[in-house]
Image: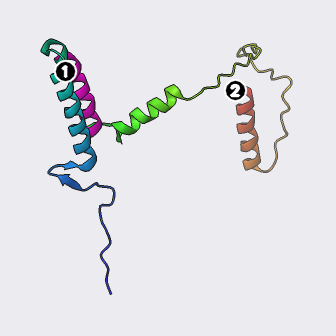
Amino acid sequence: MRYQVPQFIDVEDKIFGPLTLKQFLYVAGGSGFAFIIWSLLPTYLAIPIALPILGFFIGLAFYKVNGKPMVEVVESAFKYFFSPKLYLWRKTPKKPEKRAREPDYKTLDVPKISGSKLRDLSWGLDIKETIGE
């Protein structure tokens, strides 16, 4: 027997025309809230108050920040601002700055030439790394 495997499980179903259930509820809630403000306040006060609120709800429905829905971003912002925070300060002594100085070639131990060229090459690379520090 063959069974059909669901394909697009990350995509929400469009229930209300081109809108998903969440999008429809955000737009309907924002519109209802804006209508209540419009009916209770005079027009010159209602427009500047209702337009940002309506824009916020439309943003919740459609806008994505870095691929995440705006609802998750707002939720994370509330958690960050209202959760307790612990700030620690630990004073560390300043370390003196290292100045680049010339290597002292008199104190370097230069190995005698051996039969192995690979060993000589690796020793030379190791010395260059320690001199550059």
Picture residue at 70% right of the left edge, 18% below the top: 89
Looking at the image, residue 40 sits to the left or right of residue 114; the answer is left
The residues colored magenta run 47-62
Q: Nearer the viewer, residue 92 or 64?
A: 64
Q: Which residue is mark 1?
A: 40
Q: Quadrant of residue 45?
A: top left
Disc 1 element: helix
Residue 58 lies, in percent from the top left, at 23, 34
Amino acid at circle 2 = Gly
Say if the magenta span includes residue 125: no
Q: Which residue is mark 2?
A: 132
Q: Position of residue 27 (x, y in %)?
A: 22, 38
Tell me which label, 2 or 1, sits earlier in the chain. 1
Q: Position of residue 15 (x, y in %)?
A: 20, 54
**Quarter-of-image position of residue 121:** top right
The quarter of the image holding the N terminus is bottom left
